[in-house]
């Protein structure tokens, strides 16, 4: 399958620990939202479902980054996109949370530069 017709999902702990891998490549479907993509990730890796489901026991507490930008689950994803799924970092204050998110983004951008 050609890369242009795929979406790559990069998993960070705890998601990578639960799935047993750090990257998932799925065929792109059009149109699709990030929520739809996460549903397909959960179908392929059922142990991730509780982590991805809004309102679930463990779910809904993650950072979603699409092509280096913080994203919401209602945003579109398309072929060739890189999606990063990270644990949400919080500290009780909006400033701490925002600073944590920025640190995650800097780390993701650095990782993207190193990727082939």
Image (cartoon, helix red, strand yellow):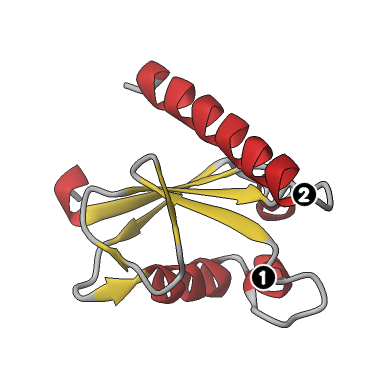
- Residue 60's disc number: 1
| 68, 91: nearer the viewer | 91
Q: Is 107 on the left or on the right of 35, as rendered? A: right
Residue at the spot 20% in from the left edge and 50% down from the top edge: 1
Residue at the spot 72% in from the left edge and 71% down from the top edge: 59
- Residue 82's disc number: none
Q: Earlier in the sequence, mark 1 or mark 2?
A: 1
Q: Secondary structure at mark 2?
A: loop
Q: Position of residue 25 (x, y in %)?
A: 39, 51
Q: Position of residue 62 (x, y in %)?
A: 64, 58
Instruction: In the rendered view, tell whether residue 103 sits above or below residue 96.
Output: above
Residue at the spot 51% in from the left edge and 27% down from the top edge: 106
Q: Quadrant of residue 46?
A: bottom right
Q: Position of residue 112 (x, y in %)?
A: 40, 27
- Residue 90's disc number: 2
Q: Secondary structure at mark 1?
A: loop
| 59, 101: nearer the viewer | 101
Contact, mark 1 vs mark 2 (Cβ under 8 Å): no
Of tags 1 and 2, the one toward the viewer is 2
Q: Residues within 10 Å of mark 1 (few under 14, many from 20)?
A: some
């Amino acid at each position: 399958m050609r890369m242009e017709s795929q979406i790559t999902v990069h998993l960070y702990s705890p998601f990578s620990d639960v799935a047993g891998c750090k990257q998932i490549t799925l065929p792109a479907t059009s149109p699709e939202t990030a929520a739809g993509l996460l549903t397909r990730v959960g179908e392929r890796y059922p142990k991730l479902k509780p982590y991805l489901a809004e309102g679930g026991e463990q779910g809904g507490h993650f950072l979603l980054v699409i092509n280096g930008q913080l994203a919401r689950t209602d945003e579109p994803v398309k072929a060739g996109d890189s999606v990063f799924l990270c644990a949400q970092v919080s500290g009780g204050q909006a400033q701490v949370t925002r600073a944590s998110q920025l640190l995650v983004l800097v780390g993701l951008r650095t990782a993207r530069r190193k990727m082939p």
